[in-house]
Amino acid sequence: MKKILFFVAFATVACAAILSSCKKEDEPSVEITDPADKTQTAYADQSAGGDFTFTASYAWTATVKETAATRASGVDWLTLKSNGAEKYDGAAGTFTLSIELKPNYTGSPRAATITINSGTATVGVTMTQQSTTQGGQTLTPTIALAAQSGELKAGAAGTATFAATTAGIDDGKTGAVAWFSDAGGEITGTASAGISAAVSAVANNAATVTITATTASVSGTYYFKTTIDGTTSAVATLTIGAAALAFTDDAAYDIPAMTVGAAIADIDLSDAATGGTHPYTFGATGLPAGIAIDPATGVISGTPTTVAEAGTATITVTDATTPTTQSKSITIGYGAIIPAPTYTISASTLTSFGSKEEGDTPPAAQMVTITNTGTGAVTLNQPAATNYTVGTLSTATLAAGATATFTVRPKANLSDGTYNETITITGTNNAKATVFAQFTVTEPAPTYTYSVALDTPATGELDFGSVDVGYAQPVYKGVRIKNTGTGEVILQATAPTGYDFYLGNNIGTVAVPAGSWMDLDVRPKADLAPGVYNQTFDIIASKEVAGSLITIETISITVKFTVTAATGNNITFGKETEENW
C-alpha cells in the first residue's frame, strides 16, 4: 500500500514537473521592443504621437482607454495605424503601430493607455497629450468659412454654400446662423424675407452652410456668423446679385406688313424682359426707316417712310445692374413695306351743250365717266350742280382702275344767259376731279309779221266809189297795219309824186312795237277831174339791226276813186266838153 501511494505521489510530482516545463515553453507573450516606447508624450497640436514596436506570440488585439475618461464613447482623439491604415488586431508576429492624435482643444492634459493583448499576455503603452502647444499656447475650437460658392440672383430660387472647416468640434455636431447688419458682426440683424440658412453636421472637421433664396426679389450684401457646439466663426459675406436678365421673344413682337406713310400699331416689348435690375433700357438695330423703339418703355412705333422688303431687326434690353450691366437681345421680323396708295380720279369731258332759246326743251344729257387712276380704293360722293341736273352715280366705290358714270343735262326753264359751270367730283382721301359744262340760253328771235286791215276789206282795196265831178271830198278811209309778230316793226308810208290821194296821219317813219299797230287815213284829193283814179302807195316794213333798217317787206295798198262828168246839157268847145249846169 505504501508503495502504491509513493508511486502515485511520484507520478503526480513528475507529471506536475512535466506540465510545468510544457507551460513555460508555450505560454503567450507580448513584448515592447523598446521599453522607452511604453510612455509617450505629445503637445496639444501634435497629430503624430510616435510609434512603438512589439512582438506577440499569439494573435493580438489592441484596446485604447482614456486614463481619465471624459467622453462616454471612449477615446476618439487617438488612433492606431499601421502603414497608414487603422490597425487594432493581427496575427502573431512583430508589428509597429503609429499613434495618430487629434489636436487637444480641451484645455487640459489627457492620457490614454494602449493595451496589446496576446492570449493571456498584455503589455501597455501610455500616451499623454499636453494641454498646450510647444510654445505654451492653449488650443481653442475654430470654424473657418470659405468664400461664397454659387451665385444667388434676386427673384430667382437658388442656393449658395459656404464650406466650413472646423477644428476641435466633434463629428455630428450641428449649428446655426446668426445675421448681422455690418461686416464687423457687431450689430445683430435679420436676413430679408426669402432667405434661409442651414448648417450641416460636422464630419471629419468639415461642415457646410447652405443659404437658400426663394423667389422674393431681394438683393444686396448680407453678413452672418456660424456657431457649432459653442464655437462661432468670423463674419462671412453673402452676396445676392441681381436676377439674371431674360429677354423672351414672341411672334406677337413681329411687325406685320406695312405701308409707307401709314403708322403701325404700337408693339410693346416691356413684358418681354424679366429679371435683372430696373430700369431697363431698350435699343434696336435694323428697324425700317421711320420705325423706332422707345428706350424707356420698349414700345415700337412709327410710320414707315421707305419701301422695303421683309427683314429682321435686333432688339436689345440692358438692365441697371451695377457695377456691370446685363444685356440680352432677341430678333424680330418685319413684313414688307409697300408704297403708299395713291388716291386720284379723272373725269371725261363734256362737249358744249350749245345754245337754246328760252322755253326750248333742254339739250340731251351727256355722260361723264369717272376713272380711279390711283392705286387705292376710293368712295365717291354724289356730285351736284347749280344749273345742271346731275344723274346718280352708277357706283360709289371704285377699286383701282374702276369706273363710274353719271349724266349731266342743263336744267329746264333757264332764263337767257350763259351757264358755264365747273362740276366737282370728290371722294375719300381727298380724291377730286372736275368737269366743265357750257350752255347758253338766248331770248327768242323776234318774229316780224303783221296784218293789214282796210275799211273796205272785201275788195282788198280802198275803194272810194264813183262821184260826179264837183263832188264833195269823200271822208277818209283807214288802213291799219298791226304788228302780229314779236319784234318791233318800222313802218314807212310814202305817197308817190303826183299822187291824187291824201295820206293823212303817220306819214313818214313809225315804230310799231309787237302787238301794236299803225293807222293811216286816206282820201281822194278835192276837185279831181272826171276820170278813174286807181293808184297804189307803199308802206315799207323794216326791222332795226345794229342801228340800220333792214326791209322786211313792202306793203302795197291800192286806192280806187272814179269821178264822172255831170249829166245834163253839154256844151262842146272844140275838143272839150263841159257840163252845162
Image (spheres, grey):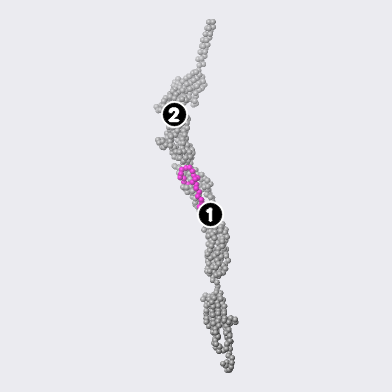
Whole-percent x, y for residue 67 in the image: 44, 22
Q: Is residue 278 magenta?
A: yes
Q: What's the residue at 59%, 92% (across, down)?
A: 568
Question: Which of the two labelled residues, at mark 1 and mark 2, occupies the earlier sequence position?
Answer: 2
Q: Secondary structure at mark 2?
A: loop
Foreground of the two, 379 or 115: 379
In the picture shown, does residue 47 fall above or below 286?
Answer: above
> Tag on residue 168?
2
Where's the C terminus, which quadrant?
A: bottom right
Q: What's the residue at 51%, 11% (across, down)?
A: 17
Q: Which residues are magenta?
A: 261-286
Q: Is residue 423 magenta?
A: no
Q: Is there CB contact under 8 Å for labels 1 and 2? A: no
In the picture shown, does residue 472 fall above or below 50?
Answer: below
> Tag on residue 224?
none
Whole-percent x, y for residue 88 in the image: 49, 23
Q: Which residue is mark 1?
A: 339
Mark 2 belongs to which amino acid? Gly
User: Do we see residue 466 in this rendering?
Assistant: yes
Q: Secondary structure at mark 1?
A: loop
Mark 2: few, some, or many residues within 10 Å (few <14, many ≥20)? Answer: some
Which image quarter: residue 376? bottom right
In the picture shown, does residue 467 fall above or below 445?
Answer: below
In the picture shown, does residue 304 fall above or below 238?
Answer: below
Mark 1 belongs to which amino acid? Pro
Mark 1: few, some, or many residues within 10 Å (few <14, many ≥20)? Answer: some
Whole-percent x, y for residue 324 in the image: 45, 42
